Image (cartoon, rainbow, N blue to C red):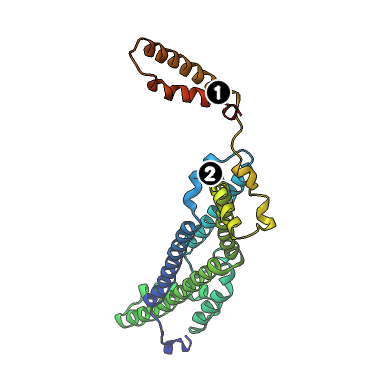
Amino acid sequence: MSDGDDATPTLRVADVDKMTDAIRGRIDLFGKALAALATLGTGGVGLTKAADLAGWDHGEEKWVLAAVACLVAAAVGALIVAVRLMGVNEPVVLTASLDEEQLGKAKTDVNVIFGEAAQKFGFSTLLALDEHAMSLRRVAARATSEDQRARTAARTNEVQGEIDRALARARLVVVRRNATRVVSDRRAWLCYLTVILGLMGFALSADYVTSEPQSSLELVKTCGEARSAGPLPSSVTSDCPSPSAESAPPSPTAGSRERRAALIEELTALLTTCEEAVADEMLQEADCDAIAGLVRELLSPGAVE
């Protein structure tokens, strides 16, 4: 055997596994923080206005489509981020034989860890060290004396312990690299940017669709206040009606003339009845003066104009 008998492990397998679980816990916390920020962001941009888009006016279809597209893009980006973060919690099963597909970019670091563990016992690879541990178990099983069996079992436990520590350290490296990749690689930043721009685009499009134009009363009030302060600027003149248009009385229409004629006819009939009552001495002439005054006022040239 080699000088691996003097090797003293600095970390137990349980300690390394706790470090791995801590990284996964931080990724979970990071995901929850992103979800909280997304909730605040959607509330800040008025995401609750999505239901208001159903009542858009004709000609605003492109803005509605833009709002929906931005919202879908933000949702897809957030979904991709969530799926990538959940991938860190997937179990990592490693053996002494390297699985290049599972290791990915962590292969170099894992090779170094396996090589260090194997060299402690005079081997070049962890797979060879694992085979050595299996041969020690067979020797211990065929031992003829208790002393030989105890020494062989102790050696086997030492070798197997080093293998287990190497595998635990390799799992830690794989999880750490996966966590770094899903949080800060180019695809992650692209997803973050998609979510942010999607929410901003939805906010702008939704505000345009759901915003209401200024009412006529508010426009007249604003223009009146602006005129009282001084001459209107050129940017406001086009929106404000002219003073003559605001103060000019409405011109009589055909409907108003018909109503006036009907009223005159009714008052004339009422005046005739009143005069007959005066002739029968049922009323006095003063009682009919008010009706006669109304008829004269309606028949005057100024009233007709």
Question: Alpha-carbon neighbours of circle 2 within 10 Å: few (<14), some, or many (≥20)?
Answer: many
Position of 126 relative to 50 (above/below): below
Residue 72 visible, this orientation: no
Q: Position of residue 135 (x, y in %)?
A: 44, 73
Quarter of the figure that contains the C terminus: top right
**In-image side of 267 versus 215 (left or right):** left
Q: Position of residue 58 (x, y in %)?
A: 62, 38
Q: Position of residue 193 (x, y in %)?
A: 59, 62
Which of the pair 42/167 is nearer the observer? 42
Residue at horizontal 39 percent and vertical 76 percent from the top: 13
Furthest-right residue in this view: 234
What's the residue type where badge 2 is placed?
Leu
Give the residue pinned by disc 2.
Answer: 53
Which of the pair 268/263 is nearer the observer? 268
Residue at horizontal 57 percent and vertical 71 percent from the top: 107
**In-image side of 69 versus 162 (left or right):** right
Give the residue pinned by disc 1.
Answer: 299
Position of 206 relative to 137 (above/below): above
Label located before the other in sequence (1 or 2): 2
